[in-house]
Image (tube, helix red, strand yellow):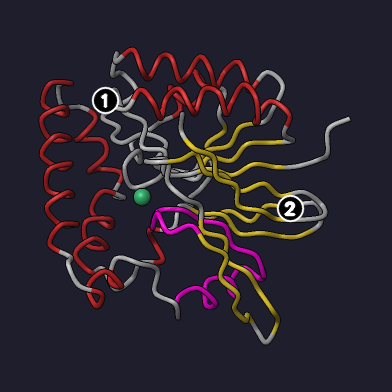
Amino acid sequence: MAQQHTLFIADLHLAADRPDITAAFIRFLREQAIAADALYILGDLFEVWIGDDNPEPLLQQIASELKQLSNSVPLYFIHGNRDFLLKQRYARQAGMQLLPQQQVIDLYGTPSLIMHGDSLCTLDLAYQKFRRWWNQPWWQWLMLHLPLSARQRIAMKARQRSAMYKASYTNNATTQIMDVTPEEVPKVMAQYGVTKLIHGHTHRPAVHQLEVNNQPAERYVLGDWYSQSSYLTVSPEQWQLVFHPLA
Ligand code: MN
C-alpha cells in the first residue's frame, strides 16, 4: 500500500504557449497526485484568468484532467494573483473545492496555514494597492461583465505591465521588495496559532526556519514550474520539497 501523503503545488502559470509545462502537469496528476490523500493548488495555476466562460481548449483540457483526478483524490484551490477571477463554474467543472485566501488545515495532526503568499509581500506597495483594488467584489463583477474580447485585451496589457515591472527591479534591494516581508510571517502564523506555513507566489522554493511565540516553526515556499516541476509532499513522517526536470 502506498504511503499516506498530501501534495501541494503553486505557480504553474499554465498557458497555451508552454505545452511542456502542461504535459508535465498532466503527468504529475496521472502518476503522482493519483496516489495522494489530497492535492492542494495554492494559486497561479494559470498564467492568466479572464473568466470561466473563456473557451480556450487548454482550460477545458485541464478541467477534464482535474475532474478525472477528483473522482478519487480531493482537490482544493486557493486563488493566486493571476487566476483570482476563477469562479465556482470552472471549479465545479474541474472538481476543485475553492478555499478562502488563508486556510488552516490539519496535516496528519499538525495544524498548518496555507495561502498563495502575495499578501505577505507587504513592502511591494504598488502591488498591494492593485491587490486591494481587484479584491473588491464590484471590480470583479464589472470585469467579468465585459465582453470576452475586451477582457483578453486587458489581460494582455496586464501581462506586459507585469513583465516591465519585474524587469525594472534590477538590484538586490529592490528584489527584496518583491519577496515576503520577513517580519510579516511570524505575525500571521501567531495570529492563526500555527508553526507551519505553506505558500507560493515568490518563485523562491525554500524551507525557512523561524520562531513563532518562542517555538520553532517552518515556512515552506513552493517553486514555480518554468524550468522544472516542483511540489511539496507531506506525510506523517516528513515534509519534502521535490523537483523534477520538465521533459
Ligand atoms: Mn503569484
Q: Quadrant of residue 194?
A: bottom right
Q: Quadrant of residue 82?
A: top left
How many other residues sit within 10 Å of disc 2, few (<14), some (14-19) or many (≥20)? few
Say which element carries label 1: loop
Q: Which secondary structure lies at badge 2?
A: strand
Residue 145 horizontal/vertical position (percent): 20, 27
Residue 65 vs residue 244, the one in the foreground:
244
**Quadrant in the picture for the N terminus:** top right
**Residue under numbered circle 2:** 106
Image location of residue 212, percent across then percent down:
63, 80
Q: To which residue does mark 1 refer?
A: 17
User: Which amino acid type corresponds to the residue marked 1 in the rendered image?
Assistant: Asp
Which amino acid does the dot numbered 2 rest on? Asp
Point out residue 175 in the picture as x, y percentages from the top left corner: 26, 69
In the image, the segment drawn in magenta is 184-205
Disc 2 or disc 1, which is closer to the eye? 1
Asked if residue 190 is among those painted magenta in the image, a careful observer would answer yes
